[in-house]
Image (cartoon, grey):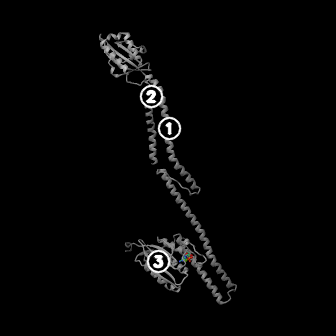
Amino acid sequence: MSIRKRLIISHAAMIITPILVLVVIMGLLHIVFTGNSSSGFGTWGDTDSDTQMELFTQLKKTVSLHEEKLFDESYLHRINEQLDKEETYLVIRKGNHLIYSSKEVETMTLDELPSFGSEESRPVVIRNGEDHFSVLHYDFYFQDGIKGSIFLLNHAPSFVTYARVFFPIFILSLILILFITNATLSYFMSKKILRPVNQLSSASDKISRGDFDFTIKPQGNDELNRLLRTFDHMRLQLKESIELRDQYERNRRELVANISHDLKTPITSIMGYVEGIQDGVADTPEKQKQYLDTIHSKTNYINQLIEELALFSKLDVNRETFHFEKVNITAFIEDYQREIEDDMDEKGINLNLNGHTTSNVLIDRNKMIRVIQNIIYNSVKYIEKTPGEISVSLTDKEKMVEVCINDNGTGVPEEDLKNIFNRFYRVDASRSSDGSGLGLAIASQIIHAHKGNIWAENRNSGGLRICFTLQKVEDEERG
Ligand SMILES: Nc1ncnc2c1ncn2[C@@H]1O[C@H](COP(=O)(O)OP(=O)(O)OP(=O)(O)O)[C@@H](O)[C@H]1O
Ligand SMILES: [Mg+2]
């Protein structure tokens, strides 16, 4: 549930709950008060008791049948005694005189009593601002034609007494209920809000200290928990980018170290040969030629290394420009195969092309030659048997063409397969001493720039297979 909804419900509950509880308490108080009416309390407009009504009817009959009894003290006294038990008092009015008043109300004046003809209104008589009487009222005419009224005054509980007991209870209950409702709702609401807020605050604290290795556990789907989720996502991304930055920094250091090493070795040997000539160690023209040839091959190597490094770093920072063209991949490989045919013959290697596809791919010709060349010449380098076998196979996939170059060389230990595309990675540095370990890294960068994939696997029959994919150019794009 959203926090907005929860707040609305909580605010509504803060109003509704006290009202409901108050209604219940009022009801209970009502029962308590009315239940005690016989012991002195009664509520306003209480229904008249049976005895009262009986005596009231009897008095009405007396009026019409034995009017003289209304002047009979002993008769009235008897009635009065019975009424007294009900805390009800009798008053009889004739004209402007009160001809009978019970002792308890004998001080009551004519003005305080309801007027003749108002018997339907069931009024309440208030005496001295304190005593309340609910009134049963009967009007009639005496035989001599004078207006008469009979009043049964029921001593209702004093409003002040009632209020004195009732209002403190009411106010106290109100305060208590408001306090309890408020405290309960605040507790649950703050728990719901504070938990994620605390999590956020401790997470921000950890991140500011560079600690990204913790988990945030959002519970629910409200606004704050959604914020927690986004925050956790941000933490993961930040962690990844920092790891990447560290990785780049490590790579940079490694690169500098490798370059210095790879340049230092041939330069040291060149210096040795130059000194050999200078010092006259190479004392015959044959020896001198041999020294110079070695110096030439070492400088060649350095030149090649620098050229590879320059290409690699350009590809690494995306500075190398690509000129993509639509090319028939079968024809493209066949052309390249023809180009290196003589060289392969010379090296005693059979180079075959298997599979055929009419599909066109979008490639940069020169860069693709570089890829194929790097892979094929690796095979040439690592084939130890004769005849060497290299085959290029083409497979049509749904949106890709898969190119695989297979050899019957030494293969690569399984655990090294995933690393051979890393810069400067050489499985056995001593065996591939003339390589810099950049050939496959460059191939991988070029293939990725073509939005393809490259991978290596060992062949069951022995030897290595390196495959890469190239995106096909769709038919409609060809036209
Ligand atoms: N066909 C293969 N057979 C066996 N091992 C291979 C083959 N191709 C590559 N490797 C291994 O993978 C490593 C990386 O190859 P990569 O072409 O990147 O570097 P390199 O050939 O050593 O040097 P460079 O290509 O820069 O002259 C090689 O050193 C070698 O150990
Ligand atoms: Mg190589």
Image x and y of residue 161, in percent: 46, 24
Label 1: element kind: helix
Residue furthest to the right in view is: 279
Image x and y of residue 204, in percent: 55, 53
What's the mark number on residue 32?
Answer: 2
Q: In the rendered image of this protein, does residue 465 appear above or below residue 142?
A: below
Judge by depth and name the residue closer to the eye, 327 or 113.
113
Image x and y of residue 81, in percent: 40, 14
Judge by depth and name the residue closer to the eye, 204 or 161.
161
Amino acid type at circle 2 is: Val
Amino acid type at circle 1 is: Ile
The residue where tag 3 is placed is 365
Question: Of marks 3 and 2, which one's residue comes earlier in the chain?
Answer: 2
The residue where tag 1 is placed is 180
Judge by depth and name the residue closer to the eye, 387 or 200.
387
Q: Quadrant of the C terminus?
A: bottom left
